[in-house]
Amino acid sequence: MNMKIDPWSALNIDDYSKLFDEFGILPFDDMVREIEDPHKFMNRKIIFGHRSYDLITDAMKNNKPFSVMSGFMPSGKIHLGHKMVMEEIIWHQQQGGDAFVGIADREAHSVRGMSWERCRDIGINEYIISLIALGLEPDGHIYFQSGSEQVKDLAFELAAKANYSELSAIYGFTGETNVAHMLSAVTQSADILHPQLEEYGGPKPTVVPAGADQDPHIRLTRGLGHKMNMFKIEGREDKSGNKYFSVRSKGAPEEAMKELSQRIPGKTKLFEGHVDVFSADNFEMLLKTVRDVELEFGGYAFVPPSSTYHRFMSGLQGGKMSSSVPDSYISLTEETKGAAKKVKRAKTGGRMTLEEQKKLGGEPENCSVYEMFLFHLIDDDEELAQIYTECREGTRMCGNCKALAAERTEKFLKEHQELREVAKDRLDEYGL
Ligand code: TRP
Ligand code: SF4
């Protein structure tokens, strides 16, 4: 199978190991140990992969600045999948991250042909209100792409570094693709990089929590971030095996190279187009000096963004969740009784008959009701483990699970919808 991931078609990725081998996403397991109080998605291996998340654990541990950023296309109903990303943003905000949430109205307008008015309406009434109800604090930044001059200006700068072949290799763009659609791809990169602009405190690690289907955006953005930078630091070795660093210019002004060679402590040598650094045992110090000089000379010094990737829930009827099949998903704004009914009709991992269930046990790993527990409805790990064991041992019947899941879904939705009513009156605190 061709593993091109297309963020606009939200395909179900059934073999996650390919993401590690073919795309260089790293397993998240190693990171969990570095985190003091991990989010339940981390402990439960729902977040399974990352890029450069070590920068974020380092920032969290050592109280260094970092940000968390994601975007939502205002195209339809807010559902449990969006809730996952929102919870991840809020968790990182609680760990000290500066939070940014973009409503991707440029994307919805150019890709889906949605009017600006509708984008605004859905952006506020579906996404933003739930985001506030779920607990995003007002010191975070919520914005519409079309309303952010910084994002739009940066998108144009990034567009100067992105060429057609690169975009089409990632997204499968063709000669029929409209230019605004292409612009919306670089706008998304601008979303991700703009927390590092001077106005927001300058270069810093930024994590983008996302579903695995969003990785092409991250790869594009990491590449563009690199391309925008004036310098590149390379590790080298001379003929007798001594290690040193070489700071290479990528179109940096000559003055900046000179400044660098003077500013970097220890022995350095200035060449045309690069400065070699022979006594940099403190790499962080070197990195900081290079960034400072770049900023002074008008560059960006972007840190390539980090990311985390979560698994998707399957649809309530098995198969994929799809916005065109209302029975396959639960929306945060839907009528609570109807939602409970959907859960009661959901596909389980149970056997054909009660006897079989008792003899063989059920299959929680193939059960959308169990997924509801795992992803959303049960916080207590022990309670979850008990359901898992009872199911496997054949002492638990699907009817019980469904009733419990339906009841909790109804309760969650009711509470969330009450909090949404409160959130509606708080929009001005968020500058909206
Ligand atoms: N393209 C994303 C989607 O399809 C939305 C999005 C816009 C986004 N900007 C972003 C996601 C920045 C992550 C980071 O829903
Ligand atoms: Fe799913 Fe519960 Fe049935 Fe097991 S008993 S298959 S967890 S619904």
Image (cartoon, rainbow, N blue to C red):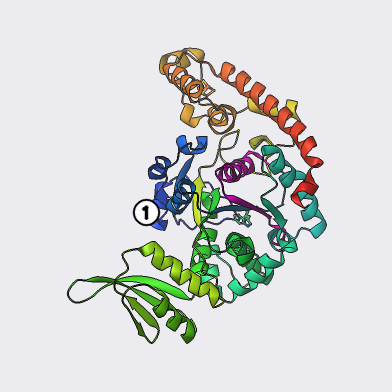
Q: Quadrant of residue 239?
A: bottom left
Residue 427's spot in the image, x, y percent?
78, 46
Left or right of 30 on screen, residue 218:
right
Left or right of 117 on screen, residue 234:
left
Residue 67's spot in the image, x, y percent?
57, 53
Indicate whether 66 appears above or below 296.
above
Is residue 49 on the magenta stretch? no
Q: Quadrant of residue 261?
A: bottom left
Which residue is most to the left? 240
Q: Mark 1 near ligand 1 (CB under 8 Å)?
A: no
Residue 413's spot in the image, x, y percent?
70, 30
At 61% from the left edge and 64% from the top edge, which residue is drawn? 190
At 39% from the left edge and 68% from the top edge, which residue is drawn? 286
Secondary structure at numbered mark 1: helix
Residue 229 can be seen in this image: no
Q: Which residue position holds label 1?
A: 21
Left or right of 384 on screen, residue 129:
right
Q: Nearer the viewer, residue 194 or 429?
A: 429
Q: Amino acid at mark 1?
A: Asp
Q: Quadrant of residue 87?
A: top right
Position of the N terminus by quadrant: bottom left
Indicate whether 260 appears above or below 173.
below
Is residue 98 on the magenta stretch? yes
Left or right of 361 on screen, residue 334:
right
Residue 288's spot in the image, x, y percent?
45, 66
Residue 16 can be seen in this image: yes
Q: Which residues are magenta?
A: 78-106
Using a 10 Å C-alpha cutoff, classify the residue at mark 1 as few (fewer than 14 neighbours), some (14 to 19) or many (20 or more). Answer: few
Indicate whether 305 appears above or below 343.
below
Q: Nearer the viewer, residue 165 or 291?
A: 291
Task: Report the number of discs.
Answer: 1
